[in-house]
Image (spheres, rainbow, N blue to C red):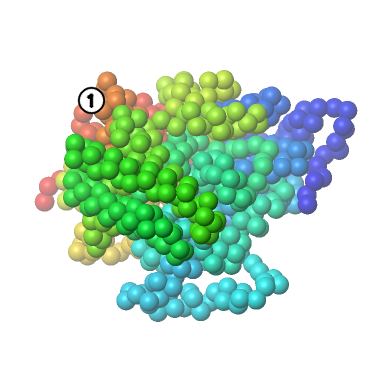
Amino acid sequence: MATTYPFDFDPKQSFIQQASDWIADVFYERLPEAGFELRDEQIYMAFQLERAYSEKQTIFAEAGVGTGKTLVYLLYAINYARYTRKPAIIACADESLIEQLVKPEGDIAKLARHLDLTIDARLGKSMDQYICLNKLDEARGGIEDVEAYGDIYAALPDFVHNPATMQAFHPYGNRKDYPELNDEQWKAIGWDVFQDCLVCSRRHRCGQTLSREHYRKAADIIICSHDFYMEHVWTYEARKREGQLPLLPEHSSVVFDEGHLLETAAQKALTYKLKHSVFESIITRLLQGEVREELAVAIDEAIEQSEHLFQLLASGSRAVTGSERREVVMSDELLKEVNRFGAVLSAIEEELVFESGLFTLDAYQLTIVEEHIEMLQIALNLFKQPSGLISWIEQEQGQDQAGSTLVIMPKLVKEILKERVFSKQMPIVFSSATLSVNGSFDYMAESLGTHQALSFSVASPYDYEQQMSVAIAAIESQEEKLALALARLRQSQGRALILFPSKEELLRFKRDIAALPDYSAYRFLFEGTAEISHLIDAFQHDEASVLCAVTLWEGLDIPGPSLSQVIMWSLPFPPNDPVFAAKRRDAADPFGTVDMPYMLLRLKQGLGRLIRGRDDSGLITIMGKELAGERVMEQVNRILPAGVQPELLTVRSN
């Protein structure tokens, strides 16, 4: 276990002050001697973080592209972890950002190499990044991709199939281990929220369980996603009640990289997902024992009512253009059926109190059922109070109506964050290039529920006026966009990242260019066709290729000629789905306070993908019909780097 400090520690002096002095020496001397550029922005950020770690406070660290902010927070997190004997948590916005942090040429490897440090950094990946052995068995028995799933099964470690006690094991089943699978293929075998791991007979041989044992022992850093960290926060008490360890161990500090996205992750973690088939599979476990007729009748009634309720939800929901989420239509009939289902669940709870005294039911199974019913009752009560939440229906292609999923998400998560995150009295760092709105951090502080945070902002050191050219086209038609994109790709000789606001627009582009011979001159890599870090690596090493993505507006770091142009297919306004529809209903000026800030934030992040080093240069192309409006154009001009004057493009009609 790494407990030594990279400096001579004097226990009579302040640890943080000594660590800060050493970090200053690193940036002033050690790294410049190794060929790194001395950056005043890093020094400034280091002194700001010193106060946050010394006073165990939350800090908003807004630092532009190229300031080297990652190196600063890593050095503080590592030293503080060794001082407290608890690992630091680095929470990234998504799995692709995690991979970039730990890649061989990433910042952790650089620090280890140039400072002669042994850094114990381990990945705590989300559950959905691992194979579910039960789903793999189902997929092998299906009719699609049977050979691929059979190969995956055959390559599983021997201890997965051997019922004997494991003498040795190693983590396996990570999404990254199967880069050739597209997202739909992975979805068929990857863990999902409806898997009941507590009663799974194979959970002690499961890849995600074994990986948990590995990352818990990290001495310096555990790297996870925002989603995973918030899942840890939300399930902490429940897992302790069930006799399980929390998802993450006790830790010394937290860094939220791309911290402006935490609210979305928190909402996702606090979301309830209800599905009839899952309820039926759990409640029928009670029938495996000898139960009284009253309980058996109540269970049958609950199953029947659940199926009826989900059919009603699905048939009464409305499709939303540009979204896979269906809007729930509230009605008196729907509320009556929700109340009826709740009453049946209450009757089962009463019967279980009596039944438990007879000791006819397995105690463990009984606990699982009681926990599930309690969750259902909480979710149904929330659903009946729509003013404080957002709900929608998810229905996969080919599902019947009873197979639909009801999703219930709270609008505001700040009370939970305030209670379970910001009250921990430990350093919490929000790091991003976009945390403030018009120079103020109030919007971020208010949405997250922290009102005593420290804050600072430093600009990017790059000369954008010389390094970046921006072109804007106020166009709408697909034909015009395809013509302009081809012309711009010729200008940069491929080597481009095309960002789409939605999966729907990306798929339409993919279909359209298949019929256009001129586009065949370029190799296109599409998000969703393989594991994301595999696609990023292919894009970086095939210099003339073109990467098309929906989720890479933030965090993608590819210096050099492989990324010489960023094309934004449309302005990234939020979708017209139930989440943003609810936010718009609550706003006096929906466009100005919901749509515009969201779009500008993502647009600014997209701009940041181009210039990743002082030697980089390239093109930005922004398309969108809204650019014809003076209000939108004024705001877009305002977020462009200082000195960058956009060129207004027109497209000639054929």
Q: Mark 1 Cα within 10 Å, few/some/many (few <14, many 20+)?
A: few
Of 226 and 47, nearer the camera is 226
Location of residue 618 in the rendering, given as x and y in whole percent from the top left corner: 41, 45
Is 405 positioned to the left or the right of 214 in the image? left
Is 424 positioned to the left or the right of 489 in the image? right
Location of residue 160 in the rendering, given as x and y in whole percent from the top left corner: 58, 73
Determine whether 159 is above or below 539 in the image.
below
Q: Which residue is drawn at 26% across and 22% down?
A: 589
Determine whether 347 is above or below 150 in the image.
above
The quadrant where residue 529 appears: bottom left
Name the residue furthest left: 654
Q: Residue at x 59, y 22 (%)?
A: 454
Location of residue 585 in the rendering, given as x and y in whole percent from the top left corner: 26, 28
The quadrant where residue 386 appears: top left
Is 413 positioned to the left or the right of 424 in the image? left
State how many labels appear.
1
Kindly identify which residue carries mark 1: 630
Q: Residue at x 27, y 43 (%)?
A: 340
